[in-house]
Image: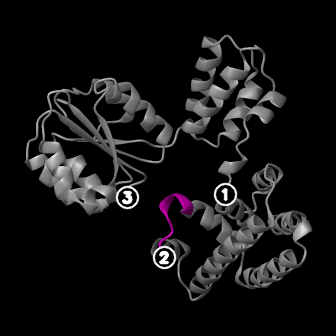
């Protein structure tokens, strides 16, 4: 049975014992688990990974069936689940075990997912999707926080904070905690404070930098480069990530040039392009025709050699190359 994330408070937690929480919004998921589940089972919470469970299913099942005077109710949280666990979950449900609640936590599950379909169709188990928050939702969370803490801050500064959290509620909650500690001595927050407090550079990985470069998002690319102090090893990793993505674009363009439709090529590409990456890949396709992407692949190989020969200046070499390619 499907329940929308904002309807969770309507669930009868004494009646329903199996939940699938899936989606990219880890921050919201964690909030729900703490608010609605952990307070019911404060001393009987057990966390597992899917692989741990599947490696020894008998041991796990025996643990569920065992009873203890001091451990009557159990909350089991199983992380990083996939379709591999669906048969075992069906088996557990068939045992009709009393006094347990099992939460399965997954990232994004496609519509064809067996696990997702099983939870959506069965009436006695709950499936809750957690989609990414809009900037409007994050803005509301931030406004409520600053009002409650009586911290003076402009809307422009809140916008900067949300932008730096990159649409991620978990990032926002972490940064609000930092701001709360800072605000004990300072009740007014400005943009400079946000830039100092919200050091989110570690969240920008090589994939995000190279994706924005190939999509020619110059503002985002520049921001990522400015907020990071990449080592020589980082620079080499980034060039290799860029090379992998450039070669994928080359293969896509070759297929399109053989009179295939862009939508068809992207949909059927191997290895599959994840659904949330499809739009940025389409932008990259539009920006990099066949001849241009071939030249870039040659240039990437040359840049890696140059970085290795000039390790002291590796970041400048990489930055100049990335910015040049983004502007082309």
Residue depicted at x 27% and y 55%: 53
Question: Which residue, given by chain and number where applicable, does mark 1 sit on?
Answer: 205
Q: Residues within 10 Å of mark 3 (few under 14, many from 20)?
A: few
Question: Which residue, given by chain and number where applicable, does mark 2 sit on?
Answer: 271
Element class at badge 3: loop
The picture places residue 124, in percent across and down from the top left corner, at 15, 39
Which of the colour schemes (rainbow, by chain, secondary structure, one colour) is used?
one colour
The picture places residue 237, in percent across and down from the top left corner, at 71, 69
- What is the quadrant of residue 161 in the picture? top right
Q: Quadrant of the C terminus?
A: bottom right
Residue that lies at the very extreme toward the left in this rendered image: 95
Number of residue marks: 3
Residue 297 left/right relative to 302: left
Q: Residues within 10 Å of mark 2 (few under 14, many from 20)?
A: few
Element class at badge 1: loop
Mark 1 to mark 3 CA distance (whole Å): 24 Å
Whether residue 114 is visible = no
Q: Along the polypeptide, which appears first: circle 1 or circle 3?
A: 3
Residue 242 left/right relative to 68: right
Nearer the viewer's eye, disc 2 or disc 1? Answer: 1
Mark 2 to mark 1 CA distance (whole Å): 21 Å
Element class at badge 2: loop
Residues in magenta?
272-277
| In magenta stretch: residue 172 | no
Question: Which residue, given by chain and number where applicable, does mark 3 sit on?
Answer: 110
The label on residue 282 is none
Q: Residues within 10 Å of mark 1 (few under 14, many from 20)?
A: few
Q: Along the polypeptide, which appears first: circle 3 or circle 2?
A: 3
Q: Could you say which is closer to the camera, residue 162 or residue 41?
A: 41
Residue 247 left/right relative to 131: right
The picture places residue 221, in percent across and down from the top left corner, at 77, 56
């Amino acid at each position: 049975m499907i329940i929308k994330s904002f309807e969770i408070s309507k669930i009868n937690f004494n009646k329903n014992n199996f939940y699938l929480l899936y989606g990219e919004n880890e921050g919201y998921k964690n909030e729900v688990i703490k608010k609605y589940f952990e307070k019911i089972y404060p001393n009987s919470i057990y966390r597992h990974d899917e692989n741990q469970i599947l490696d020894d299913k008998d041991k796990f099942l025996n643990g569920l069936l065992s009873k203890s005077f001091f451990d009557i109710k159990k909350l089991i949280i199983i992380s990083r689940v996939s379709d591999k666990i669906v048969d075992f979950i069906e088996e557990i449900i068939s045992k009709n075990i009393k006094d347990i609640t099992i939460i399965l936590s997954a990232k994004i599950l496609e519509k064809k997912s067996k696990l997702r379909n099983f939870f959506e169709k069965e009436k006695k188990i709950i499936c809750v999707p957690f989609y990414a928050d809009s900037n409007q939702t994050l803005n509301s969370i931030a406004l409520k926080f600053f009002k409650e803490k009586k911290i003076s801050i402009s809307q422009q500064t809140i916008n900067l904070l949300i932008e730096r959290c990159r649409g991620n509620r978990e990032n926002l909650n972490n940064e609000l905690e930092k701001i709360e500690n800072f605000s004990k001595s300072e009740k007014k927050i400005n943009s400079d404070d946000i830039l100092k407090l919200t050091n989110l550079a570690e969240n920008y990985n090589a994939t995000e930098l190279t994706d924005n470069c190939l999509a020619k998002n110059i503002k985002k690319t520049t921001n990522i480069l400015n907020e990071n102090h990449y080592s020589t090893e980082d620079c080499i990793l980034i060039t290799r990530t860029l090379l992998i993505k450039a070669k994928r674009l080359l293969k896509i363009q070759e297929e399109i040039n053989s009179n295939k439709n862009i939508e068809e090529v992207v949909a059927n590409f191997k290895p599959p392009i994840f659904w949330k990456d499809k739009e940025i890949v389409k932008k990259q396709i539009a920006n990099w025709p066949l001849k241009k992407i071939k030249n870039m692949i040659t240039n990437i190989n040359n840049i890696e050699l140059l970085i290795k020969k000039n390790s002291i200046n590796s970041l400048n070499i990489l930055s100049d190359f990335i910015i040049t390619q983004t502007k082309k």
